[in-house]
Every structure is written in structure tokens, then in C-alpha cells.
Image: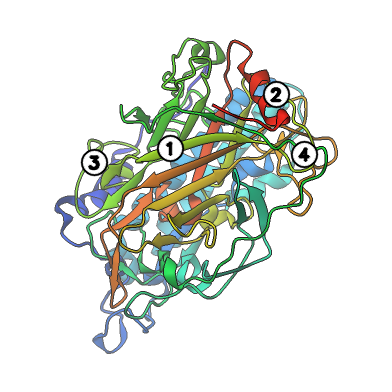
Amino acid sequence: MGRNTRKRRTPLATKAIAASAALALGGGGLIWANFYASAHESNNQSWGGNQTKAATAQVATISCPDVQQKLTNVPSRARWGVAQELANLDKQITEAYARLASTRQAQTGDPNFVQNAIVGPLKEKRAATIDRIRIDIQRVGGSFDNALAQLAACTTQTAGQTTAGGNGDGQQQGGQQQNTGGQQQNTGGQQQNGGQQQGGQQQGNAGQNIGGQAGNGPVAADFVDITKVAPNVQAQPNKTGNASTGSFTTRCGVNANKNHNTDNVIVAPGVANGAHHLHDYVGNQKVNAFSSNQTFLQGGTSCQNRNDLSAYYWPVVRLQDGSQDFDQNKDGGGKEGNVGKILTPVQAQIKYVGSPASKVVAMPQFLRIITGDAKTTTNGLANANAHWSCTGFENKVQLTQQYPICPQGSKVVRTFAFQSCWDGKNVDSANHRTHVAFADPASGVCPNGFQAIPQLTMRLVYNINPPTIQNGQVKNAYAVDGFPEQLHKAATDHDDFISVTTGGLANKIATCVNSGRNCA
């Protein structure tokens, strides 16, 4: 981008993040509940089943309104500057969370510490940043909703408010069904209580990780034994006579060459470490914060089909067993709570499928789609759209809010089904969502004004030794990378895609899908 408004991390923030990450070094068994344990605990008992007297001791994370989701009408000439300021908002939250994580002792001694030293100053910074967004938009003649200024204030969430275990995936009702290349998925509908507990008692988010991690999750409540979850996969919509029943598979590898970075060129172009977590990249090999459409065309590809220059990228999965990786002391890695050994998928299937209700049109060049939401811990589940299961269970159980504990011999499976309807005009939108949409889950029909495109589906398979939970503690946990304040919840998983093709490949994919053939 033309200007980079990222400010240098202050020494205090750097030390705070480093202090949080340093706890994870050596795999010495950092326990999440230690953040809450203090002299204020009643009867000298552990966290399980007891409430502390100091309210601040229960603060688990910071919850800030997502300004980007509300920005649906940003003039194209302002988007560059607005994206820079949105990245600043993410950076401010990251630094505030680091201060929250490194000042637990001060919090227990002063019930006003979090408000006065963390949340209050954060509101002031956010207010100034939102005002710069207003200026960027109005400078080019755009309109700004002054109500967005009210999004400056952040709140705190307690451990119980962030739990997955008490409101998990054990039973799912309603929800949106998405076609994922032959399977029907439940995507973040109303979740019922029913996540099965694994040995020991879980109270909210007080389950502990004793495998050695950065203190910001996951915890015992974030895992469920998949053999104890009731089937929840629902039927696909009936196909009409005009359905597009074919598929097109592109083979792009599993990122064995370890092409990683902590950028996100879609949401934070021109900002290094704009994602604050590490991504796997397959397909296009020249994707970073400073890439352009021209860069993509020159980027080369890991795909067998050399005309597929599309970028497919997702947060890495890490095993939190006390091991370290190359980024232990780097931004986006250990410095921001993303610690442990990076796991490479053993399989990565990328497939385009059709619509049960109509033929599809070819994807436009440089179309950008994000599926899922990296901030569901604070945003809620409206845009959650990643699914977790185990080999042998995929047709029965799909989880959104919890990671599965798979039986011996079964592998962890992570799937995504992208939005399959396009507005016919835009390759991106201000909030990176409104230019695409999901089809109706019952009929498969696109919303008015949208047309069906080949639906990108992805299936990633991991060989992970099952975590164990005993007495409310999880050992050898695994989790996706994420923003530190999002606590590594399963529902924060997401996937990113930029369509880049040559040699008429986009038309070939659409033709194959429309003809009912299975192509590769």
C-alpha cells in the first residue's frame, strides 16, 4: 500500500507479549487456571467449582466490537487507508491482551486495574483510529456512519463467557447447511449443551492445558470425545433438473515446503504481521502483505495444474506439548501466544463442486473469499464456518465449537465450504463478505441478485495423537493459530482464497461442474 500507518510496538507492549509467551518455554506445564488463582480464592481451594472474590481475577480476555464487519460501504479510493487503520485496531487489541495476560497479580490487588490501565486506554486509542477511518472515507466523498464511533469501547469476558464446553457441539440444532463436496455440514447454528466431558469435571473455561502453551488456550472445555457426540450431519438439498453435479479437483500439495507468513493480503494489505498468526500457503507461492494482482500472476504455484495460480491459505495447526518451532520468539508466533510444533496436513483436498439448484458461472479473476471468522470468541458464531471431525465419523459428526478427540487410528479432519454465490460485479467488498453469499440451506438457491459459482471446498487431514483430559486438565492439546485474545477456540478457524487462473482454467472448472463430470 502507499502508506503504512503501523506504529512500532512500544517497549511495554513488547515486554508484555514476551512475558506471556515466555511462560510457555520449556513445556513446564503452564496451567490456564493459574491466571485466576490468587489469595482471594475461598477456602484455599482450586478454581474448579469455586468463585473468586475478586471479579477482576476472572477476566479471561478482551472483547472489542469488530469495526470491519460494519464497514459495508467504503469508497474504493479509501479502502487502502481504511485497511491500514483496521490493522491498527487489531494491533491495539493484541497489545492490550498481552498487558492483560502479564499483569494478573496487579489485577488481583486492584479491582479497577483492568478498566483503568487496559480497557480505558484501549478505548481512547480505538476512538482515535475510528476517527481516522472517518476522515479517510469522507476525504474521498464517502459517507460515514457516526454510530461507528460507539464501537470504540471494549469490554472484558470472564472465563465462563468464553467456554465451549458448556455450550458446545455435542448437539446441534438448526444452523446453516453447506455442501462440502458430497457432505452436508452444520455451520454454526444454535448449539445446545451436550459436549461430552472427558474425565474429570469441567467448569466453564477453567479446564487446564498442562502440555505447555502460552496461557491463552485451548483448555479442556474446548475438546470433546467424538465417539460421545450424537450424529448431527443433516441431509443435502434435493437436486433439481438444472443442478450442476460435477466436480473439479486441483492438487496443490500440503505445504510440505513450509511456505508460511503472518500476513493477510485480503484484510490487511500492506501491513506486515497483519494476521497476528501464521498461515499455511498452497497454490500461489508469492502471497504476502505486499502482493498485488500482478504479483499473483508471476507467483508460480504448488499446484500440479500450472494454470492454477490461486492462493489457498489457512491458519496453521499446532501441537501444544511443550515443543517449540521456528517462530517461538517472533511476532505472530510465540510472542503473540501461538506456540508449539506446527503440524503439516497429511492430506489437503481442494475441490470445486456445483449447485443443487442451478448451473454455475465461472469465478471472476482475482475474486477474494474469506470463510469463517477469526474473531468468533468476541463476535459470536454468525460467521463461523469451519468444521472439525475424525476419519470414520465425517458423515455423522461435524463440530464447530470444539476440537475432536479422535479414537486411536482415526485422524483429525478439518473442512471448509466457501460461499458459493457471487454478486456478479465485485471481486471483493469493504468487509470482505457482502460480495459473496451462501445459498439457501434448504433449497440451494442463491439470494436475489447473486449467481451460483463453483463452490470451493477444502478438506485437511492431520495425524494427531489424541489429547487426554483428566481431572479437568488437557494434555498434548492441539489448536489453530489465531489472534491471542481469541483464546484459540475451534470456532475461530477460517480459510482464505484468491482466485487466480490462466489458460481459461476458470471456464474449464465451470464447464466441468456444469456437465456433471468429475475432473482433475
Q: CA distance from mark 3 to mark 2?
A: 46 Å
The first of marks 3 and 2 along the sequence is 3
Give the structural element (helix, strand or loop) at label 3. loop
Q: Are marks 1 and 2 in contact (CB under 8 Å)?
A: no
In the drawing, what numbered circle is on residue 348?
1
Q: Which residue is mark 3?
A: 328
Residue at the spot of label 2: 511
**What residue is pinned by disc 4?**
243
Q: Position of residue 21 (x, y in %)?
A: 25, 49
- Which of the marked residues, 1 or 4, is nearer the chain's N terminus? 4
Q: Give the x, y percent position of residue 40.
A: 30, 80
Residue located at (30% from left, 82% from top): 41
Q: Amino acid type of disc 3?
A: Gln
The residue sitting at the right extreme is 448
Q: Nearer the viewer, mark 1 or mark 3?
A: 1
Q: Residue at the spot x=26%, y=37% of the render?
A: 327
Left or right for 512, reference 450 = left
